[in-house]
């Protein structure tokens, strides 16, 4: 057989011939440096390849070799705490090989081939098992049990299963037909992992951000788009969730964004502990990093890689959150590749299949009952930043996201410029999960959660109407009760939905703190309205004292919270006598 | 299999065709993507180019010099076997060079230390040090409100006729490394006018910054496509100074808008499918390969900090050039035509301005303990005042609530006393002091971003209480 050789290279795309036998999406090694690439089009005996590494220096006639498999990742213990590039190579390992700067052409396994894991079987010799059944467990990180699963699609009677210390490729069990099982198995990242059935989401994903938990909640298994122009706070939101939100496993995908941001993530995540477990948050985190100046085709892979990891831990029965920053860069990678292929462009130059690809991706999120026994439910929650050009949401990536997500957290540049953070535009944002999560919040936060939510929304809406009026006639011309609404909304913006990601006690808000701030706001409005009805003049209300009290609750250390809430209640009750 | 030997220089007689800045050559053997090309011909001047698309049938070469007068059929085309490189070394300091590194100052060429490829490799994110070292620029709107740190990329968003280049020159002239560490400037002029270039150069010479500066000058009259090289030549030089010699390097590029236009010209010549407003769909990625070359490495003493100047076409911040820049850089310093017209210098509108790395670079260890609260509070009142100003335009300031009225008055003082500083350098302590004096004109209970502890320390321990 003649060896395939490069006949064209342009940007991230190479063409080689003869490769008629190759399969679509088959992985190939391109050139003498064996750059990783993937066949994305086959025509006669010519294969078009997207190359996941820097192509400059590739020349005509260099060889191209088939690998026989598609882009797969190894799934097994050791993923947690790892920092990988878009195709799953550990970045520390790459640094050991090529230093401070990334050089193309290095192959490295995702899972450390030498690490040994202590495996405790739960399945017994003689048992008949199938895909998704639990073979046993490995304590992957302190307190985190990695359930070793029979790979989807395989089945048999266990002839032998061993307890002991193994590497990810050692045989831990064999089927009667002789086929071995190990702690890890490969998975093609573009394929969704099977599950028994989808379940409706019924528990909230606790974000620790009041504006989301109270106004625009998301359920475990839900999906959210977070569009906003540059500097509106997308990354701060994604990072805050990765740090403080409640999930068993976090998959953070830095897709086509800044290197310094990733340095910040690495710096912070290494120092923070998960309040729920007291363990470093890196223990529950997988970081996938493909910065904007790294090869563009790997952006495409990075998102599927992250999704595959998430599904894998979901299958073990965990709740996994994927934080993708930013999905627009992924879509732009598709556009860049499509343009090189001279494909017929759709809207704004994006390929016509963009919306289709995006919905298939979003659909991999969800709460599910896993395959196999013992029965498990798990969930993948998907929160993706979207970077609309010019901050204008009427663009293909935002629009395609909106067709599939259950919640929209719309960020607004005007609010960001005023330093109103999170800069969530409460008029445009929505959540379809509010009702599904309300019972849980009512139980955990307070019985009147629904009412407080509705009252807060009403207050903000009324505020907007009044401000339009005041903009025409002046605040002076407003009635006292309307001025009270303006004041209440100011408190809401500043102390309830405003949250400073860099304040040690404000960065995360417990459900209880969120509840109490909402309740105090409602108390304020009720007491204020009562006072005005009694004929007290608006000017006589001690608003300054109330604002100070709210500020104190907002930034309260956990130990002081209860006392400061009581004090705020007192200040509100006394505000008319000031 | 036997490795193919490294390709050597190969010469071809005549190109098949030429279009704009592109040259199309038939069946080049083993052309390499990114390969450096010489184009010569009897009676034609020598030109340089780069392979941007290799194919069995046609290989595309992007020509960096003007192609006017080029006769493709008569040209001799040499594929050099190498990729574009530039000479780097400490002896470049003090030199003025062309946009591709040839001496312009009449002095002999530098000897240099090495030739490095100009298309730098990406920094491995795990090898990056999170930037946190404060750079004092002497500009209040930056030092106080949008702090610059080493390893950051912080562009100036200017507009036609606004003093973006002047502000960049101020920064170069006044920036002080915190502890007297080695410091250098690399200035890349990209398509700016002779006058703008002179603004820079004469100020450098006067202030004796020149001896620690390397100038790369591609001016408006120089070849357009060369603009794609100049920033990369400059950055390669900067990286070498930073990471081989441990120098803190500030790279100023003016103007990114001209760079982006050159990018568009090549894309159009290739008949590529255009992205937004005619700019290529890969412009984000391309700009990222420039801006992401800022940074600090672990276990390495130097740093590369970038202050690019971007002229907003039509003052439009949503134009693809500033938009994509803002999506990549770590903030932006935005100039305002209105402030400029009112004589405020530098005319920085702090509301849309941002430094994303400010948090790590301020506070007790870097600047002053209360820096965050101070800046947040100034922002909060100024933003409120600007809203009030809009409202006052309709209802008059009598129609405003008392707090809004005070904020409105604050706007004026803030712009005239804090932002405006003429051309004079202002130290950070002075910046902080003036800020406090403005804040202290307001009632304590309107300063909700200032904690009691900070307030107490500020007012000498008296009245740490809540409200007046
Ligand atoms: N919750 C927040 N609290 C305080 N500052 C914030 C918050 N969110 C955003 N910011 C500020 O806004 C800047 C830009 O936010 P970032 O998330 O990087 O924006 P984006 O990713 O949308 O471009 C941050 O550097 C920070 O200064
Ligand atoms: Mg971001």
Image: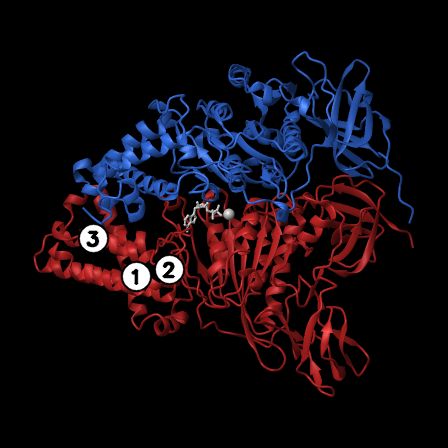
Chain colours: A red, B blue
Mark 3 / mark 1, whichever is N-terminal: 1
Tell me if I can see residue A554 in this picture: yes
Vertical comparison of B312 with B56: above or below: above
Distance between the alpha carbons at the discs numbered 2 and 3:
23 Å
- Say whether marks 3 and 1 touch (CB < 8 Å): no
Mark 2 / mark 3, whichever is N-terminal: 2
The structure residue drawn at horizontal position 24% and vertical position 53%, both measured from the top left corner, is A547
Residue A3: x and y in percent read 89, 51
SS label for mark 2: helix
Locate the C terminus of chain A by quadrant: bottom left
- Say whether marks 1 and 2 touch (CB < 8 Å): yes
SS label for mark 3: helix
Q: Chain of mark 2?
A: A
Q: Chain of mark 1?
A: A
- The one of A227 and B454 positioned closer to us in this rendering: B454
Point out the residue furthest to the bottom here. Answer: A126
- Mark 3 is surrounded, within 10 Å at the Cα level, by few (under 14), some (14 to 19) or many (20 or more) other residues, namely many
Locate residue B295 relative to residue B8 in the image: left or right. left
Residue B251: x and y in percent read 57, 29
- The one of A535 and A512 positioned closer to us in this rendering: A512
Distance between the alpha carbons at the discs numbered 3 and 1:
16 Å
- Disc number at residue A545? 3
- Mark 1 is surrounded, within 10 Å at the Cα level, by few (under 14), some (14 to 19) or many (20 or more) other residues, namely many
Reading the image, the residue beneath label 1 is A517
Reading the image, the residue beneath label 2 is A210
Distance between the alpha carbons at the discs numbered 1 and 2:
9 Å
Residue B232: x and y in percent read 65, 31
SS label for mark 1: helix
Vertical comparison of B196 with A495: above or below: above
Vertical comparison of A455 with B142: above or below: below
Tell me if I can see residue A326 in this picture: no
Mark 2 sits near ligand 1, with its Cβ under 8 Å away: no
């Amino acid at each position: 057989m003649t060896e395939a050789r490069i006949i064209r290279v342009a940007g991230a795309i190479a063409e080689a011939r003869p490769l008629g036998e190759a399969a679509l999406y088959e992985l190939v090694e391109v050139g003498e440096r064996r750059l990783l690439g993937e066949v994305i089009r086959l025509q006669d005996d010519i294969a078009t390849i997207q190359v996941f590494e820097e192509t400059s220096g590739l020349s005509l006639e260099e060889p191209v070799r088939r690998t026989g498999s598609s882009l797969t990742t190894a799934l097994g213990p050791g993923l947690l705490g790892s920092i990988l590039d878009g195709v799953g190579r550990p970045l520390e390992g790459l640094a050991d090989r090529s230093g401070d700067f990334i050089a193309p052409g290095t192959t490295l396994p995702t899972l450390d081939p030498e690490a040994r894991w202590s495996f405790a079987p739960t399945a017994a010799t003689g048992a008949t098992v199938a895909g998704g059944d639990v073979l046993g467990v490995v304590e992957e990180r302190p307190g985190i049990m990695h359930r070793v699963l029979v790979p989807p699609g395989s089945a048999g009677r266990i002839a032998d299963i061993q307890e002991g210390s193994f590497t990810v490729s050692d045989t831990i069990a064999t089927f009667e037909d002789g086929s071995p099982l190990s702690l890890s198995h490969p998975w093609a990242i573009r394929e969704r992992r099977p599950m028994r059935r989808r379940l409706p989401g019924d528990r909230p994903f606790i974000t620790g951000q009041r504006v989301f938990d109270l106004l625009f909640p998301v359920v475990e298994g839900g999906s959210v788009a977070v569009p906003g122009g540059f500097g509106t706070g997308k990354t701060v939101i994604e990072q805050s969730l990765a740090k403080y939100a409640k999930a068993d496993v976090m998959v953070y995908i830095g897709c086509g964004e800044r290197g310094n941001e990733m340095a910040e993530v690495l710096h912070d995540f290494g120092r923070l502990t998960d309040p729920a477990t007291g363990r470093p948050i890196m223990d529950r985190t997988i970081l996938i990093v493909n910065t904007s100046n790294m090869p563009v085709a790997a952006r495409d892979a990075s998102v599927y890689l992250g999704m595959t990891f998430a599904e894998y831990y979901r299958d073990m029965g965990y709740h996994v959150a994927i934080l993708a920053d930013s999905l627009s860069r992924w879509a732009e990678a598709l556009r860049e590749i499509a343009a090189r292929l001279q494909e017929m462009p759709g809207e704004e130059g994006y390929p016509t299949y963009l919306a289709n690809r995006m919905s298939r991706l979003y659909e991999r999120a969800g709460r599910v009952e896993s395959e196999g026994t013992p029965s498990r439910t798990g969930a993948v929650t998907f929160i993706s930043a979207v970077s609309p050009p010019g901050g204008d949401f009427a663009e293909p990536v935002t629009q395609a996201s909106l067709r599939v997500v259950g919640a929209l957290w719309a960020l607004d540049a005007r609010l960001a410029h005023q330093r109103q953070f999170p800069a969530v535009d409460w008029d445009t944002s929505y959540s379809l999960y509010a009702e599904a999560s309300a019972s849980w919040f009512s139980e955990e936060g307070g019985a009147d959660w629904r009412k407080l939510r509705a009252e807060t929304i009403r207050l903000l809406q009324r505020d907007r109407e009044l401000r339009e009026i005041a903009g025409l006639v002046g605040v002076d011309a407003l009635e006292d009760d309307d001025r009270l609404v303006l004041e209440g909304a100011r408190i809401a913006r500043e102390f309830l939905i405003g949250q400073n990601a860099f304040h040690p006690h404000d960065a995360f808000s417990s459900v209880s703190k969120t509840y109490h701030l909402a309740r105090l706001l409602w108390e304020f409005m009720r007491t204020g309205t009562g006072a005005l009805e009694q004929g007290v003049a608006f000017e006589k209300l001690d608003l300054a004292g109330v604002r100070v009290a709210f500020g104190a609750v907002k930034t309260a250390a956990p130990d002081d919270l209860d006392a400061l809430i009581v004090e705020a209640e007192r200040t509100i009750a006394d505000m008319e006598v000031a | 299999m036997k490795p193919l030997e490294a390709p050597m220089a190969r010469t071809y007689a005549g190109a098949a065709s030429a279009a704009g800045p592109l040259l199309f050559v038939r069946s080049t053997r083993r052309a390499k993507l990114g390969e450096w090309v010489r184009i010569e011909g009897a009676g034609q001047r020598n030109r340089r180019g780069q392979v941007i698309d290799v194919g069995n049938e046609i290989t595309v070469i992007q020509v960096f010099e003007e192609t006017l007068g080029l006769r493709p059929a008569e040209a001799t085309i040499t594929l050099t076997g190498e990729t574009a490189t530039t000479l780097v070394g400490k002896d470049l300091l003090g030199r003025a060079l062309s946009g591709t590194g040839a001496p312009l100052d009449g002095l002999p060429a530098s000897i240099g230390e090495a030739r490095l490829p100009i298309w730098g490799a990406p920094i491995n994110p795990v090898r990056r040090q999170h930037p946190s070292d404060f750079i004092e620029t002497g500009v209040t709107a930056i030092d106080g409100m949008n702090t610059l740190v080493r390893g950051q990329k912080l562009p100036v968003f200017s507009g036609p006729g606004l003093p973006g280049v002047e502000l960049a020159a101020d920064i170069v002239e006044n920036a002080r490394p915190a502890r007297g560490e080695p410091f250098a400037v690399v200035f890349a002029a990209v398509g700016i006018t002779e006058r703008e270039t002179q603004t820079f150069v004469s100020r450098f010479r006067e202030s004796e910054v020149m001896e620690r500066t390397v100038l790369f000058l591609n001016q408006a009259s120089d070849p357009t496509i060369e603009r794609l090289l100049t920033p990369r030549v400059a950055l390669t030089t900067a990286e070498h100074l930073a990471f081989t010699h441990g120098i803190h390097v500030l790279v100023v590029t003016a103007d990114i808008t001209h760079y982006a236009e050159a990018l568009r010209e090549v894309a159009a010549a290739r008949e590529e499918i255009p992205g937004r407003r005619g700019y290529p769909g890969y412009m984000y990625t391309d700009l990222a390969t420039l801006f992401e070359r800022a940074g600090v490495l672990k276990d390495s003493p130097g740093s590369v900090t970038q202050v690019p100047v971007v002229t907003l076409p039509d003052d439009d911040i949503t134009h693809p050039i500033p938009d994509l820049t803002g999506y990549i850089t770590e903030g932006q310093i935005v100039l305002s035509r209105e402030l400029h017209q009112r004589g405020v210098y530098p005319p920085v509108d702090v509301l849309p301005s941002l430094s994303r790395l400010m948090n790590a670079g301020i506070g007790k260890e870097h600047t002053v303990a209360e820096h965050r609260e101070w800046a947040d509070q100034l922002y909060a009142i100024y933003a409120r005042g600007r809203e009030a100003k809009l409202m006052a335009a309709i209802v008059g300031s009598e129609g405003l609530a008392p707090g809004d009225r005070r904020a409105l008055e604050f706007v004026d003082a803030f712009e005239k006393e804090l932002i405006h500083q003429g051309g004079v350098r202002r130290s950070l302590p002075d910046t902080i002091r003036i800020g406090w004096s403005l804040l202290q004109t307001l009632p304590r209970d309107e300063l909700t971003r200032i904690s009691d502890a900070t307030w107490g320390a500020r007012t000498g321990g008296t009245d740490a209480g809540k409200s007046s």
